[in-house]
């Protein structure tokens, strides 16, 4: 690898649940004991379990299948038919359906889903009610002529409707794809028209941050773009009644769509091959046409049972609450918590309305055992000087999960002090591409601030240099050297697989290259530095943007930061930082000097930006990621229309600032 990479030394352990009993007492430890007896392997701790899971892949995944008693109407010939990447075959010969694992809990008492809305509305759906609604929705789709392989798409909030719609769709072998109603028409159409759907499921509006957004016109326009006479299933919100004359196809009210029906074969699921498409997720689409990423029934079932059932410890007594939207792969993981029999909590609304501690309030009220959020939300609540552990009953909470971006080291101390002293803050990193994590945590493993504790079960993850050699204590490309069950079965509309191969396998043949810079440390932890295409470069030394954010965003004056490394035509390198400051704070010389000094002391002189600019807010993708690469290209003089799709940006009007800056500096 050319040049060096500047590494920051973080302080030592903040949370260290390293006792052997921590592993043995957890579900993952019980699995290890069971697997040891079954295979004669010696699996007494997590490192040993992980090594076995990647060295004996078929044995491990067969054990997952049997331990969780997963069902198939026709058994698989073998767990892994081909290990070639791309093209690995999981569960060849099997006939199954992902939804069966949810429906097996249908006769249980208790609550399957709790749906909370910003306006305070709360709805409980029992397992029996969920089962009936799934069958009712499946029957409605069949009555509309939906066949296996057809696509059903959603324009829905994070509530009960998309859960039922997805499960009802998958039950009959149709394929689900959903986005949130915050997408404008062009951005929504750029994704969903690719799929040529048979049915649209939509909501008439939603509330966010105290404002009701009427989406009836957008639903009508989207239906028109998706096809003539397209059936629309409509869920009305906030008193917004849909006008049936605005679409030319059949219009069905949500309650009618989920009513149980007699004389239908939708009470049983369609048994499909393991690689039959389950859902289609989309890439961010910030720099081009969004890619449709297709995952299969069998692979997702295996992967999510291992991830949720073992790494997260989800079980029938668990309450799983992860703040997300339907635009993000975490929604899919939240739904999959139902596979384990856990209660899933959904929230549609702003994380900071009507009070700044809204998510913590929900976690306490619903007695969540698992609460997931983003590093940005933790930073936001830390800056607001909230004390969730004092103000809410979080006694059932077993750990806090964070993903989406690297976690600043100081947030581990904040959680310990203000949420719970013995509560693990679990950082994970994965991607929409695999709808899972590559690296994460297990009970019994130490947690080091700024680092991720361990590789996930079954994931042969490593850091490679430019020559394809593994590196330790040096930054490399995040790679996966063996197949994962949840790797895409294909990209949508990519018949020869060319786009799929180019996305992951063009650098190291036969090895998955994810596109993140990562350090694999000598103590077995992992540090994610950000996307490899947005890495900063100072005099041949590579710098991870996340390292700067970790330092600067720990300052009480700073809400959020964005740093860019811009190669200019005159062979110079310009590294500006854009800052969102807290109310009433001014970027004066003393503050600039404090930022510079903090970066110099806690990172290195190379981490100090050339210039600082104050902005009112930063633009993000709709999954909350900073637009580092598109904004860098705009500052290099690129046409914004050529490098960023405004429909994929949460606040597209903010792009104008960078466009004007590029013009005036040229």
Image: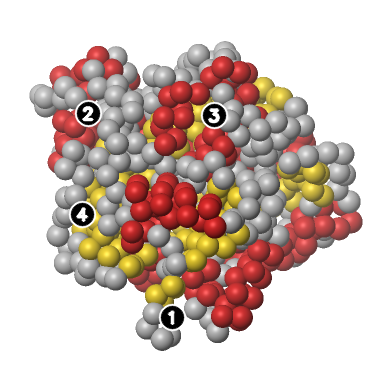
Q: Is residue 608 left or right of residue 526?
A: right
Answer few, some or many: residues within 10 Å of disc 3's Cα (few below 14, many 20 plus, some between 14 and 19).
Answer: many
Q: Secondary structure at mark 2?
A: helix
The answer, for residue 665, to whether it is visible in the render is: yes
Residue in the image at 49% along x and 70% along y: 632
Q: Secondary structure at mark 4?
A: loop
Mark 2 sits on what residue? 46
Q: Secondary structure at mark 1?
A: loop
Mark 4 sits on what residue? 474
Mark 1 sits on what residue? 568
Mark 3 against mark 1, which lies toward the viewer? 1
Mark 3 sits on what residue? 321
Q: Earlier in the sequence, mark 3 or mark 1?
A: 3
Residue in the image at 58% along x and 56% along y: 588
Q: Are marks 3 and 2 in contact (CB under 8 Å)?
A: no
Furthest-front residue in this view: 590
Residue in the image at 29% along x and 49% along y: 8
């Amino acid at each position: 690898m050319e040049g060096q990479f500047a590494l920051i030394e973080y302080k030592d352990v903040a949370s260290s649940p390293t006792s052997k009993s921590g592993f043995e007492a957890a579900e993952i430890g019980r699995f290890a004991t069971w697997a040891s007896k079954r295979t004669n392997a010696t699996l007494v701790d997590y490192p040993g379990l992980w090594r076995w899971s990647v060295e004996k892949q078929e044995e491990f995944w067969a054990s997952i299948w049997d331990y969780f008693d997963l069902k198939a109407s026709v058994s698989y010939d073998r767990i892994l038919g081909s290990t070639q990447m791309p093209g690995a075959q999981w569960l060849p010969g099997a006939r199954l359906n992902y939804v069966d694992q949810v429906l097996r809990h249908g006769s249980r008492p208790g609550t399957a889903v709790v749906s909370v809305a910003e306006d305070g509305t709360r709805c409980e759906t029992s397992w029996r009610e969920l089962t009936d609604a799934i069958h009712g929705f499946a029957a409605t789709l069949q009555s509309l002529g939906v066949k296996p392989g057809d696509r059903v798409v959603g324009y829905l909030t994070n509530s009960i409707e998309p859960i039922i719609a997805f499960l009802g769709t998958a039950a009959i072998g149709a394929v689900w794809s959903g986005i949130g109603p915050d997408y404008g028409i062009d951005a929504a159409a750029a994704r969903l028209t690719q799929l040529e759907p048979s049915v649209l499921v939509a909501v008439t509006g939603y509330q966010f941050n105290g404002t009701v957004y009427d989406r009836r016109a957008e639903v009508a326009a989207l239906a028109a773009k998706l096809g003539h006479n397209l059936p629309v299933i409509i869920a009305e919100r906030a008193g917004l009644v849909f006008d049936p004359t605005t679409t030319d196809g059949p219009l069905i009210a949500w309650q009618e769509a989920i009513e149980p029906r007699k004389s239908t074969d939708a009470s049983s699921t369609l048994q499909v091959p393991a690689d039959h498409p389950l859902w289609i997720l989309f890439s961010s689409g910030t720099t081009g046409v969004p890619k449709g990423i297709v995952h299969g029934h069998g692979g997702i079932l295996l992967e999510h049972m291992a991830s949720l059932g073992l790494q997260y410890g989800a079980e029938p007594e668990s309450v799983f609450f992860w703040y997300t939207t339907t635009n993000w792969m975490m929604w899919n993981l939240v739904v999959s918590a139902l596979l384990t029999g856990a209660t899933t909590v959904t929230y549609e609304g702003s994380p900071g309305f009507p009070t700044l501690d809204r998510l913590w309030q929900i976690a306490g009220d619903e007695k969540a055992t698992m609460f997931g959020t983003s590093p940005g939300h933790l930073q936001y609540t830390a800056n607001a000087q909230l004390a969730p552990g004092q103000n809410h009953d979080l006694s059932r909470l077993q750990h806090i999960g964070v993903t989406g971006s690297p976690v600043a080291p100081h947030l581990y101390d904040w959680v310990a002090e203000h949420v719970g002293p013995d509560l693990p803050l679990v950082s994970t990193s994965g991607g929409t591409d695999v709808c899972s994590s590559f690296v994460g945590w297990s009970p019994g493993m130490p947690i080091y601030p700024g680092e991720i504790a361990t590789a996930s079960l079954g994931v042969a993850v490593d850091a490679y240099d430019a020559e394809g050699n593994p590196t330790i204590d040096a930054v490399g490309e995040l790679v996966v050297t063996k197949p994962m069950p949840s790797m895409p079965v294909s990209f949508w509309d990519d018949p020869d697989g060319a786009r799929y191969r180019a996305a992951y396998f063009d650098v190291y043949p036969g090895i998955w290259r994810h596109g993140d810079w990562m350090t694999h440390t000598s103590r077995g932890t992992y540090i994610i530095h950000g996307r490899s295409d947005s890495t900063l470069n100072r005099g041949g030394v590579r710098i991870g943007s996340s390292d700067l954010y970790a330092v600067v965003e720990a300052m009480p004056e700073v809400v959020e930061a964005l740093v860019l490394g811009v190669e200019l035509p005159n062979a110079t390198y310009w590294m500006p930082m854009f800052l969102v400051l807290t109310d009433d704070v001014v970027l004066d010389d003393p503050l600039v000097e404090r930022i510079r000094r903090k970066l110099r002391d806690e990172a290195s002189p190379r981490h100090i930006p050339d210039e600082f600019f104050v902005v009112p807010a930063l633009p993000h993708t709709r999954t909350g990621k900073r637009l580092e690469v598109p904004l860098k290209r705009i500052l290099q003089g690129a046409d914004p229309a050529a490098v960023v799709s405004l429909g994929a940006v949460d606040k597209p009007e903010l792009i104008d600032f960078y466009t004007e800056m590029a013009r005036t500096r040229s």
